[in-house]
Amino acid sequence: MAGDVEGFCSSIHDTSVSAGFRALYEEGLLLDVTLVIEDHQFQAHKALLATQSDYFRIMFTADMRERDQDKIHLKGLTATGFSHVLQFMYYGTIELSMNTVHEILQ
């Protein structure tokens, strides 16, 4: 019948989106923000950061000066700790040791 609508739900959509962001990250494509922590620079996608962290969601969507910046300096973090957090955001895995747990939890 005309007008009947069928719905479709992809069981791999979330995985596909995550894999797409990982591929872009690994290829260095469409990276739209550089986060500076200590003397290290981390490139990332604002959209991914915003979906994985309320902190970044507010930073990039509220009326904050960082919203329109390409390079953002973050204080109070360690580069080592943040690199583990960023890895988790993109890959969903994190390697913990007694030496890095404290830095990551900050």
Image (cartoon, rainbow, N blue to C red):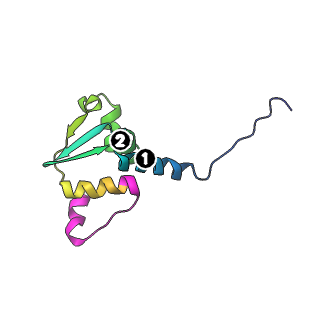
Decide whether residue 53 is among the magenta residues: no
Looking at the image, which residue is at 21% across and 38% down? 72
As displayed, is residue 34 above or below residue 81?
above
As displayed, is residue 62 above or below residue 19?
above
| Position of the C terminus by quadrant | bottom left
Dot 1 or dot 2: first in sequence order is 1
- Identify the main secondary structure in magenta: helix
Considering every residue shown, the one lying at the far front of the view is: 27
Looking at the image, which residue is at 40% across and 45% down? 24
Residue 6's tag is none
* Distance from Cα at disc 1 to Cα at disc 2: 8 Å
Looking at the image, which residue is at 86% across and 32% down? 1
Residue 78 is situated, as x and y percent measured from the top left of the image, at 17, 54
Magenta region, residue range: 89-106
Q: Secondary structure at mark 1?
A: helix
Residue 45's tag is 2
Residue 66 is situated, as x and y percent measured from the top left of the image, at 25, 33
Q: Quadrant of residue 97?
A: bottom left
Decide whether residue 104 is among the magenta residues: yes
As displayed, is residue 62 above or below residue 53?
above
Residue 29 is situated, as x and y percent measured from the top left of the image, at 37, 41
Task: State how many labels appear.
Answer: 2
- In front: 73, or 102? 73
Query: Which residue position is annotated with label 1?
Result: 21
Instruction: Give the residue type that dot 1 points to.
Output: Phe
